[in-house]
């Protein structure tokens, strides 16, 4: 109970201190900003629809991954959540402060992410992008004890070259396009603090190599991406935050638009687990659909594993479902449930979650409770709160 109160008090204190007035909130163009946030999250560049503006006002691109045929316009002013542009380069990012209060363990306050995007638009062939972050740094631990100093991680590093009007060749380290969450996992852009295992644990969530992206940009026909990692992830992330390492990864993903933000997609990935030499083949499905104030999202994966290493099952599978109800334009109520069965252990992870969030772009506050009914080293019963923002 003490941990729950600590988590809730810190959440409310931060909310009351930072929340803008109703007048300020009304000035935000919620629909347009939602599109901006959504496009900002993706590992695939997209144009962003914008409302008409007076001719005396320049509208600047806000995605950190601009299309390579666009010029980046310098701007001297800065607006929180929309990055900073200078010449042919842009700087953006996000941060997330997380308060965790798991049952039976000390509460802690963490710098979960401090991420910086830097990119350039130099020509059709040279368009670099890099994302680096500080993650897992413990700011406060209840009762003292050993605190983690965090890690500096190179999340993405690649160059885009435009091959055709709607096709891009990408060389370097990327987010593997499996499902939807892995491509938009920045804290301000996802609904909850507790990331479902289905969205990252059962496959190689990063890939270092070559990928081909096709985006017709008409919001009607499918977009797709194919990728190949001939070796291992480079540079590798620390073992503590990426316990599974993969090599020789080959995969693809296709999305069929169902509207501006709605979609249904399918994924496939094949690779080898470095530590055991096991080979796996995975297929997955994802869907995002909005019904008025109600938004529904779900992902499911299943994979077959083979090799000499001992394991509990030859199959690994997971599925989660999430509903997000907009009580107002800022307040959201959220319910989520997941079932995930690893191939290495006998018992599955089964959890349910209930939470609330307050969103006034680019600031997001979240408070949730998760109940674990199965066996998992990744998700424990308890409270979680966070404050995050794009910058």
Image: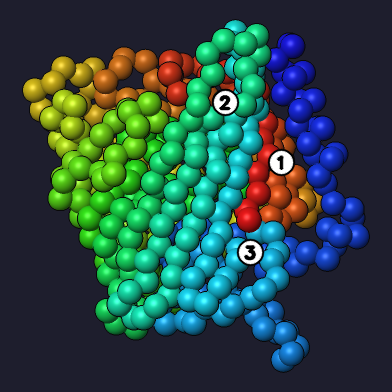
Of 127 and 31, the residue lying toward us: 127
Q: From what the image shows, is residue 130 above or below residue 59?
A: above
Taking the image as shown, residue 97 lies to the left or right of residue 319, namely right
> Would you name the residue on which mark 3 appears?
82
**For the residues bearing labels 1 and 3, Cβ distance under 8 angstroms:** no
Q: From what the image shows, is residue 202 above or below residue 372?
A: below
Foreground mark, 1 or 3? 3
Residue farthest along the bottom direction in this orientation: 55
Q: From what the image shows, is residue 203 above or below residue 25?
A: above
Location of the N terminus (image quadrant):
top right
Foreground mark, 3 or 2? 2
Label 1, label 3: how far apart the Cα atoms are: 19 Å
Location of the C terminus (image quadrant):
bottom right
> Would you name the residue on which mark 2 appears?
138
Whether residue 258 appears in this view of the structure is no
Locate residue 210, reporting x and y percent: 23, 60
Sequence-wise first label, 3 or 2: 3
Q: From what the image shows, is residue 160 above or below residue 376?
A: below
Q: Residues within 10 Å of mark 3 (few under 14, many from 20)?
A: many
Give the number of marks.
Answer: 3
Label 3, label 2: how far apart the Cα atoms are: 28 Å
Secondary element at tag 3:
loop
Sequence-wise first label, 1 or 3: 3
Q: Residues within 10 Å of mark 2 (few under 14, many from 20)?
A: some
């Amino acid at each position: 109970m003490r941990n729950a109160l600590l988590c809730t008090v810190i959440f409310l204190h931060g909310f009351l201190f930072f929340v803008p007035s109703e007048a300020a909130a009304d000035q935000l163009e919620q629909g347009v900003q939602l599109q901006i946030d959504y496009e900002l999250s993706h590992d695939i560049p997209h144009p962003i629809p914008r409302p008409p503006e007076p001719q005396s006002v320049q509208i600047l691109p806000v995605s950190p991954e601009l299309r390579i045929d666009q010029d980046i316009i310098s701007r001297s002013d800065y607006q929180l959540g929309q990055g900073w542009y200078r010449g042919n380069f842009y700087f953006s990012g996000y941060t997330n402060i997380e308060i965790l209060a798991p049952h039976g363990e000390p509460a802690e306050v963490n710098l979960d992410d401090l991420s910086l995007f830097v990119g350039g638009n130099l020509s059709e062939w040279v368009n670099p992008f890099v994302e680096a972050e500080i993650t897992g740094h413990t700011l406060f631990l209840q009762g003292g004890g050993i605190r983690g100093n965090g890690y500096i991680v190179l999340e993405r590093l690649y160059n885009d070259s435009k091959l055709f009007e709607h096709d891009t060749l990408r060389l370097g380290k990327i987010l593997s396009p499996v499902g939807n969450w892995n491509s938009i996992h920045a804290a301000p852009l996802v609904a909850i603090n507790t990331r479902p295992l289905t969205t990252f644990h059962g496959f190689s969530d990063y890939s270092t190599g070559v990928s081909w992206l096709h985006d017709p940009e008409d919001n009607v026909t499918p977009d797709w991406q194919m990728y190949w990692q001939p070796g291992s992830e480079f540079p590798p992330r620390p073992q503590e935050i990426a316990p599974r390492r993969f090599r020789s990864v080959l995969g693809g993903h296709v999305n069929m638009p169902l509207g501006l933000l709605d979609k249904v997609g399918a994924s496939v990935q094949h690779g080898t687990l470095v530590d055991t030499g096991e080979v796996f083949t995975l297929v997955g499905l994802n869907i995002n659909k909005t019904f008025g104030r109600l938004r529904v999202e779900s992902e499911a994966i299943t994979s077959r594993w083979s090799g000499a290493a001992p394991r509990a099952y030859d199959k690994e599978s997971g599925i989660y479902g999430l509903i997000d109800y907009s009580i107002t334009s800022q307040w959201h109520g959220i319910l989520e449930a997941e079932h995930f069965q690893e191939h290495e252990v006998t018992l599955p992870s089964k959890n349910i979650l209930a939470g609330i969030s307050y969103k006034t772009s680019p600031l997001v506050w979240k408070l949730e409770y998760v109940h674990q009914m199965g066996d998992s080293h990744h998700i424990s019963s308890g409270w979680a709160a966070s404050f995050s923002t794009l910058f």
